[in-house]
Image (spheres, helix red, strand yellow):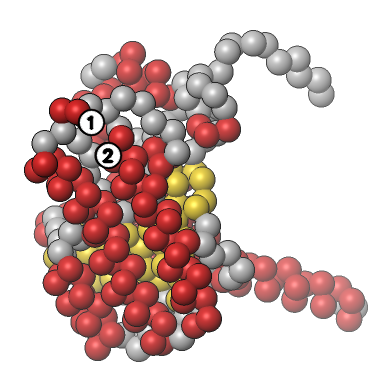
Amino acid sequence: MSDTATEANHRLQSYRRLFDLTGKTALVLGAASGIGKASAEALAALGATLICADRNKDGVEETAADLRAAGRAEAHVVDAGSAHDIRSLAEKIATRHPRLHVALTTPAVHVRKLMLDYTDEEYDRVANLNLRGTFFFLRSFGRLMADQGGGSLIASSSVRATTLEPGLAIYGATKAGIIQMVRGLASEVGRYGVRVNAIVPSIVETPLIEPLKARPKIFEALAAHTVFNRWSQPSEVAAAVAFLASDAASYITGTALLVDGGWTAIDGPPTGLTVTHRE
């Protein structure tokens, strides 16, 4: 092989290594199911050691057990809406692991109800987990990563941060707030080598949406809001998480990465006009 060809090969291999998480440690809060579980699987597949956390004890232990076959994984029972639980988890990780390279949070709750009918308790339930919980996560793990001099923080927002319909105002407000917190923290911890980003999914096919499948008109109407006319799979969102976690995203921070199937690119469902396609 010529020197030129060798150099080209090295450059190509360096791009592959950007996505490799071997030797890195990643925390996934919300690892028992859905996007969190799929993200834990994606990060483990790329070589990371996983710290799985969730309030669902059986679910998080099952995820960690499944991942141990591919490498190291541990499980922690944590309430994502509790400042005490998040702070305690950060302290445990700082004590047990030399470094935390990636931290993702996914838990959220949604009460679909007209704003004028919302009770104080319902508002608190949604805001406390979605917004306060994300704040607790970003504060504790932002401190940890700033102290260690680097890392990738990833929060979970939603297209409902910018596109709404009746009954989604409070949920959407929390998801919009998450994006602003991500931007703010990114501006504050960048000097320490810490990146902070958000994923912004639209509709994701998880076990939680099974009741919607029993109402096919609604299920299909939501799918039609995307240019692909389908719901996303958790693995498709997890792939975006893996990218933001990796060195391939080393110059990306303060960003809200859309994984929405074109939901926010179009104004409502496609019209059904035929596009002439030529080879």
Q: What's under tag 1, amino acid-wise?
A: Met
89 left or right of 243 in image: left
For the N terminus, which image quadrant? Answer: bottom right
Counting from the top left corner in percent of width and height, residue 120 is at 11, 41
**Above or below: residue 232 compared with residue 8:** above
For the C terminus, which image quadrant? Answer: top right
Calculate the distance from the C-alpha at mark 2 to the C-alpha at mark 1: 7 Å
Between residues 51 and 273, which one lies in front from this camera angle? 273
Counting from the top left corner in percent of width and height, residue 258 is at 51, 45
**Residue, x 50% and y 52% (percent of image)?**
256
**Pointer 1 residue:** 115
- Identify the mark nearer the N-term, 2 or 1: 1
Q: What's under tag 2, amino acid-wise?
A: Ile
**Above or below: residue 254 compared with residue 152:** above
**Pointer 2 residue:** 170
View extreme (front): residue:
116
Residue 71 in which image quadrant:
bottom left
The answer to whether the residue labelled 2 contacts the one labelled 1, judged by CB atoms less than 8 Å apart, is yes
Give the crowd class for mark 2: few <14, some 14-19, many >=20 residues within 10 Å. many
Secondary structure at badge 1 equals: helix
Residue 165 in which image quadrant:
top left
Residue 171 in which image quadrant:
top left
